[in-house]
Image (spheres, rainbow, N blue to C red):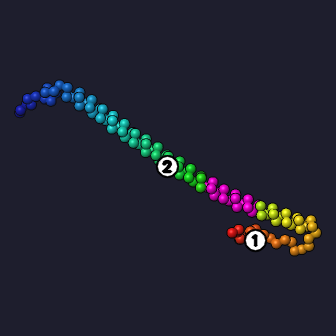
Amino acid sequence: MRQPSRTVTEVNPDFGQGSLLGGLIGGLFMFGGTWLVQRNAKRATTTDGAQKLIDQLQEEGAKKDQRIERLEVRVDALTDYVSALRHHIDTGGRPPPPPFPPDLIPGRHAP
């Protein structure tokens, strides 16, 4: 059986130490890069979710603002009609009462 003439460590005694150190440094960089990518991906997902929630809340707020405006218009029309009825009664008006405003008839909306 033939014996090897020289081993790698006999040719270059620092071979094992340099490779080990290089492998560790490379592994640390790879781990660090992977960690940063995952962290940023989680942050982006969280930001997207938060932005969606903000958009949803703004949309709901806009819908409620529109509803409030419609209700305010309706309350103003009812108040005007009540005032007209009271005036009709106070002045001794006889039936029929003043006509009901078309905007307040159920199923009809102001143009």
Q: Quadrant of the N terminus?
A: top left
Q: Residue at x 68, y 59 (%)?
A: 67
Left or right of residue 80: residue 43: left
Q: Secondary structure at mark 2?
A: helix
Left or right of residue 106: residue 52: left
Q: Secondary structure at mark 1?
A: helix
Question: Is the magenta region chiefly helix, strand or loop?
Answer: helix
Up-down relation of residue 60 to residue 89 (above or below): above
Left or right of residue 13: residue 59: right
Q: x and y percent of residue 100 in the render?
A: 80, 70
- At label 1, the amino acid type is Pro
Across the whole image, how many numbered discs are drawn on residues?
Answer: 2
Q: x and y percent of residue 107 in the render?
A: 71, 71
Up-down relation of residue 17 to residue 65 (above or below): above
Quarter residue 27 falls in: top left
Q: x and y percent of residue 79 in the render?
A: 81, 61
Q: x and y percent of residue 13 in the render?
A: 17, 25
Q: Which mark is residue 48?
A: 2
Q: Is residue 2 found inside the magenta-colored segment of the image?
A: no
Q: Residue at x 85, y 63 (%)?
A: 83
- At label 2, the amino acid type is Asp
Q: Which mark is residue 90?
A: none
Q: Which residue is mark 1?
A: 102
Q: Residue at x 15, y 30 (%)?
A: 8
Residue in the foreground of this view, choosing between 28 and 61: 61
Segment colored magenta: 60-75
